[in-house]
Amino acid sequence: MSRERNLAKIAESTFSKLDKVHSEIFTMTYGAIVTTLVEDLDNVDEVNAQLDKMGHNIGERLVDELLAKTGLNPQPDMRYVMEIVTRVGFRIYLGITPTLSNWNADSTTVTLSFRDSALSDWVELPHTLDDLSYFQLVCGVIRGALEMLGMKVKCTITADKLKGAQTTDILVELQEVMQAKFYN
Amino acid sequence: MAPTPLAATSTIVLHNEMLQYTLEKYPDSAIERVEQMGFSIGLRLVERLALASTRPLLGKANDVVMFICKDFWTAAFGRQATNLRQQRGVFYITDNAFPWIINVSRGGPKDAAESTLRSLILSFASAVIGGALSSLGAVGSVVPNAHGDQVEFTVTGQFMA
């Protein structure tokens, strides 16, 4: 519990020092990107793949800034890293704190649940886009961020608020802890 | 849902991905594509802001430009514009450290990719501002002029009053 409080404190003090914008500009930009990709690409699977790729790049960049601004330097410990990702990362960069639940016994899989998010405010998907994963960018972000921290994970959207679920849920599964490349 | 504040970096990295994608996919028409996208983002952003605003929105040119410099600038770029001056119906809006280009301005002036990205970001930003203005009934052009991190946007247009 104290570790969680500590991370929340780090998040607030870091956040107070950063330049901030309204979530709306982010929402609009993301909406415009998805719209463009849907127009540009042949099928929805390609759109999902492109969103995932963009997210991966973003995750790599954000984790860099996050570590630099907070001074955190976590070992590849899935529980601790996921707490950092939710309580600090999402808090700062998406303005929300998703909940973590359903840890398995050996702490390698967990579900992240998003109740609200700037990403999908005012979004409605037409039925022709039933297979579009609007949240796929976030899967990519988590994947990219954890990769930078030495963990290879698989992210799957298991519930989607835009398709009638109560929350948007992402299942994160640890696949491999990678050898540290440079230090330690 | 009320707007949530979030780190400016989030939008910057998202723009960067969008610009890289556009450059790869449409090397010859990247600017037009990015401008179209920016225009619609600015337009829609102001529609949202207008719902919450207490300022007169569709008034005189001065009111419109003030709204752009204060409310719109804060929502889109994180703070108010640094300076506004007007000369013979033309508005000059200055931001002394324009956040969208700060991270790309560090490379040398000779780095071609860097300067392409930089001018693309400026075109995009100008289009966002142009979209915002058009949402407020102004028709005209927004031209960026950058020196280092400082950007001056020249707004020439016809306003409703």
Image (cartoon, rainbow, N blue to C red):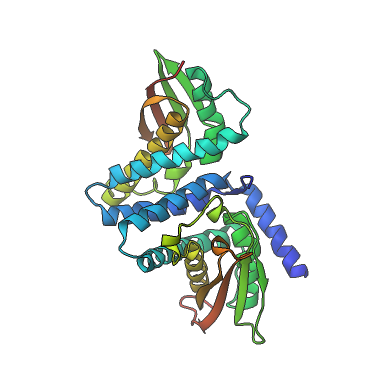
Please provide percent x and percent y for residue B62: 50, 18
User: Which residue is farthest top?
Assistant: B88
Horizontal arrangement in the rendering, residue A103 relative to residue B21 (left or right): right
Q: Nearer the viewer, residue B26 or B113?
A: B26
Horizontal arrangement in the rendering, residue B151 relative to residue A112 (left or right): left
Please provide percent x and percent y for residue A115: 64, 61
Please provide percent x and percent y for residue B43: 45, 37
Q: Is residue B148 visible?
A: no
Q: Tell me: residue B62, above or below residue B126.
A: above
Q: What residue is at 36 percent from the left and 57 percent from the top? A: A37
Q: Tell me: residue B68, above or below residue A57.
A: above
Q: What residue is at 75 percent from the left and 64 percent from the top? A: A5
User: Which residue is farthest bottom?
Assistant: A106
Q: Tell me: residue A96, above or below residue A99.
A: above
User: Which residue is farthest left?
Assistant: B28
Q: Tell me: residue B96, above or below residue A41.
A: above
Q: What residue is at 57 percent from the left and 77 percent from the top? A: A76
Q: Nearer the viewer, residue B2 or A88?
A: B2
User: Which residue is farthest front?
Assistant: A127
Q: Is residue B123 visible?
A: yes
Please provide percent x and percent y for residue A157: 53, 71
Q: How many marks?
A: 0
